[in-house]
Image (tube, rainbow, N blue to C red):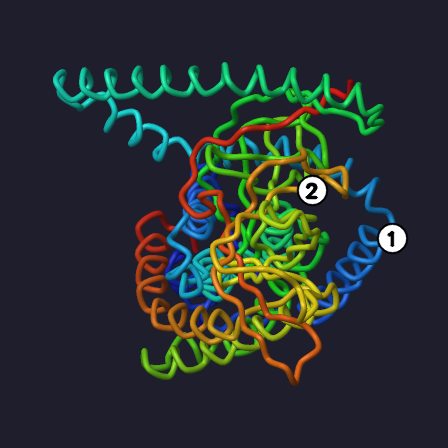
Amino acid sequence: MNYTDLSFSGKFIIVLVFCLGLILTVIPLPRVVNDFRPNFFLLFTLCLVMLLPHRVNLGIAWINGLIIDNFQGILLGQYATCFVISAYLILTIRHQMLVFSWLLQIILIFGLLLCYQLLLFWLQGLQGQLVSLRWFIGSASISAVCWPLIRMASDYIVKKYALY
Amino acid sequence: MLEKLPNVGSQIIRLIFLRNHTSGLRLMILLLVSVSLMTWSYRHPLISRQWRQYVSLMITPVIYLIHMPFDYCQKLSESLQTRANLLNNNIALRAKVMLLQGQLQKFQSLQLENEKLRQLLKYSAVSQRLRLTLAQVIAIQASPFNHEVMINQGSNQHVFVGQAVLDAHGILGQVIDVMPYYARVLLLTDTRSGISVQNSRTNQYGILVGQGNTGLLSFLNAPLTMDIKKGDVLFSAGLGKHYPVGYPVGVVRRIDKNTTEQFLNIQVAPSANINSTTLVLLVWVDKK
């Protein structure tokens, strides 16, 4: 199937959405609430992979992960692995996600985020770094609750700027 | 059927039913690349650091873009103060500078006296002279579980890996990663951090390690017979040669003595303002 190429402004909008997600992921918060910070960058990536699989593919999800790796100054490819696996998982359930109710979507996203955190937990553990259990559950659950917001915002942007 | 629909409409409908059969293959390839990248950057940390320096040039604008609103907010709150308030602050700061200069005069004479005594005793230990530079903390919290901060000075300002970082109250941490325009500082409270200390009251040595989320430090392998009290001030011993000697590291907050265990459980609160510092001092040690 052939799709029309996205204009420069369309590509710019997608990059802008990712930048917004990245900014929300790294702005400083008090340490008490930091463990419960939603993973906006991942959520925006997953949402765009789900809505526009022909524009935002696994390769872009992988590059987004690599950006986080560079931001954190950790082993290159760690977040890239987690991002690409999460993006693949959302691609496999994208048809269901497009029609499911909000509650079912939240539950599925929560499960997917737990897989992501577990993978990250293993990769961090291999390097001997500790991850708090509060972050493990807290971040995934708050991110899942934020999913409808991200989905609605992404839907609006996709329709408004005709990114399909 | 789908082909007969108008262009945009058919595109949306196609998108809903889109199935990408090559995504499994793509996943395998990307995973393979990721694993090789991880292995490569683990085996060759120096080369990967160099590579990361080039990539950092691309993300540096994003970092400063994120920091900009915080910087402007701070400048705005400073510029919105009343004249009377500014004058009062000015007077208070002048008085503080005066007091500190008075104390410094005493310290300088003490330093000279100390050096003379060292010469008389033929004490061979190297005395340190420090050069300090101010750096600003960038408002970025990249990692959810590491206790790290970014500062706005990098290799272009001759910052180096292992350099000690202080704040107004004590030792804050050390530089672990240097990029051309920014550097990453590992705070003392991180679990990967360790520092050799000396008790100011008893002159006993020890090692403090970060506890992570509690924001405290703990004494490593302190024997049950160790002479230590709550409120003891611990200074850097400089044994690891990373940190300068004699700077406050922390104050003993709690001591748990359990005779069934081999060591004392000692919790130390860091002297430095770990969570809310915005200005830090970078230390260069000139050996005399």
In this rendering, position of residue B135 left or right of residue A10: right
Report helix, strand or loop for mark 2. Answer: loop
- The spot of residue A151 in percent (x, y) is 36, 64
Residue on which disc 1 sits: B43
Residue B227, numbered circle: none
Q: Quadrant of the C terminus of chain B?
A: top right
Between residue B158 and residue B62, name the one nearer to us: B158
Residue on which disc 2 sits: B237
Q: Residue at x 45, y 31 (%)?
A: B279
Q: Residue at x 48, y 35 (%)?
A: B137
For the residues beneath circles 1 and 2, the answer to whether they share a chain is yes
Distance Cα–Cα, label 1 vs label 2: 33 Å
Chain name for mark 1: B
In this rendering, position of residue A18 left or right of residue B127: left
Crowdedness of circle 2 by 10 Å Cα count: few (<14), some, many (20+)? many
Residue B60, above or below B197: above
In this rendering, position of residue A110 left or right of residue B84: right
Q: Amino acid at mark 1?
A: Arg
Crowdedness of circle 1 by 10 Å Cα count: few (<14), some, many (20+)? few
Report helix, strand or loop for mark 1. Answer: helix
